[in-house]
Amino acid sequence: MTAEPVRIAIVGAGNIARSHARAITSQAEAAAPAPATIVAAMDVDQSQLGTFCAEFHIPGGYGDLGTLLSQARPDLVHICTPPSTHQPIALDCLRGGASVLTEKPPTISLREFDELAAAERRPPWFATVFQHRFGAGQRRLKQLAASGALGRPLIAVCHTTWF
């Protein structure tokens, strides 16, 4: 008995969405049967949405999240939209029974994050992309903090100075 592939929807059809779609499709091409398939995408820009769906052979293109959730019935939604939109989209997905993987930051405030935590029922799950959390800079900072060399932390600021 083979498991059904995870049904994925991508919300947002910009550059970061293309990175997500390439990662998903490369995994699907490498495995038989495919572990996941992109069943739908959503964007408010219909032209960009059409181009995105054509590029990645996505069968369903939607301009509205509610319609996407009810018609495409994804298991997992990748949120690839501007940061201020992450929380309301994620909340609708969780309440609709779909797990969420969102780009960072997951929310704009701790209150918003608490609302997402309350809506997560396991499943559906909520997760955030943090691809650099185990990089050399993080390991060095952790070592310095653990050794006491930095003293007692009171505040921290991180600037990512690349695009």
Image (cartoon, rainbow, N blue to C red):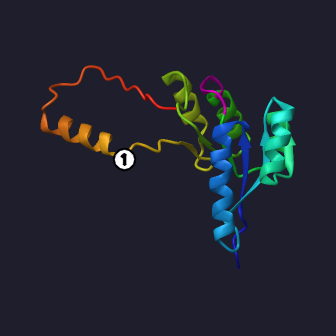
Residue to which mark 1 is pinned = 134
Name the quadrant of the N terminus: bottom right
Residue 77, compared with residue 14, is above or below; it is: below
Can residue 92 be seen in this snapshot? yes
x, y percentage for residue 102?
A: 59, 39
Residue 102, compared with residue 2, is above or below; it is: above
Front-most of residues 118 and 87: 87
Name the side, left or right, on which 134 lies relative to 2: left
x, y percentage for residue 15?
A: 66, 38
Residue 48, compared with residue 37, is above or below; it is: above
Task: Reply yes or no: does residue 45 show up in magenta.
Answer: no
Name the amino acid type tagged 1. Phe
x, y percentage for residue 85?
A: 66, 26
> What is the quadrant of residue 153 in the picture?
top left
> What is the quadrant of residue 87 in the picture?
top right
Magenta highlight range = 81-85
Front-most of residues 86 and 136: 136
